Amino acid sequence: MNSVQTFYPVGQVDEFMSRIGRVLELKGIELAVFRTSDNQVYALENRNPHPKGGPIAEGIVSGHILYDPLYDWQIDLETGLVQAPDEGQVRTFDVKLEGGQVWIAV
């Protein structure tokens, strides 16, 4: 099985507001893309793991944690893991920055 990832350009890093999510669709997947205050960029599936679901793009970023306003959950942007005492995981996607360009692998 071929495990080589294909990265797609999605915009310049300065097009992504710091600590605010941006929704993109890439290869049929709705993504929530976040830029942290230290200019790291993370891409997660825009689907809340809470049983009631919903988007995560409207969450608020502090450090490398996404604070979900709907259910008061905290989600680690690097791993997608929901922080205790809650449980769940958001699908994450690899991101790379080259020359100010943001690339996401799907």
Image (cartoon, helix red, strand yellow):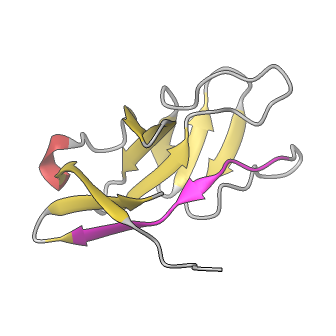
Quarter holding residue 96 = bottom left
Quarter holding residue 16 = top left
So how many labels did they put on this image? 0
- Name the foreground residue: 65 vs 104: 104
> Measuring 16% from the left and 61% from the top, which residue is drawn there?
101
> Measuring 37% from the left and 58% from the top, which residue is drawn there?
104
Task: Determine if the magenta segment contains residue 94.
Answer: yes
Residue 17: where, in percent of width, then height? 24, 39
- Name the foreground residue: 27 vs 25: 27
Residue 21: where, in percent of width, then height? 40, 35
Is 32 located above or below residue 88 in the figure? Answer: above
Task: Determine if the magenta segment contains residue 92.
Answer: yes
> Measuring 18% from the left and 54% from the top, which residue is drawn there?
13
Name the side, left or right, on which 101 lies relative to 63: left
- Name the foreground residue: 33 vs 3: 3
Is 32 located above or below residue 80 in the figure? Answer: above
Query: Among all residues in the image, which is located at the extreme left?
Result: 99
Name the side, left or right, on which 90 lies relative to 17: right
Residue 27: where, in percent of width, then height? 44, 43
- The N terminus: image quadrant: bottom right
Q: Is residue 77 visible?
A: no
Q: Is residue 8 visible?
A: yes
In the image, which residues are magenta?
88-97
Residue 73: where, in percent of width, then height? 72, 36
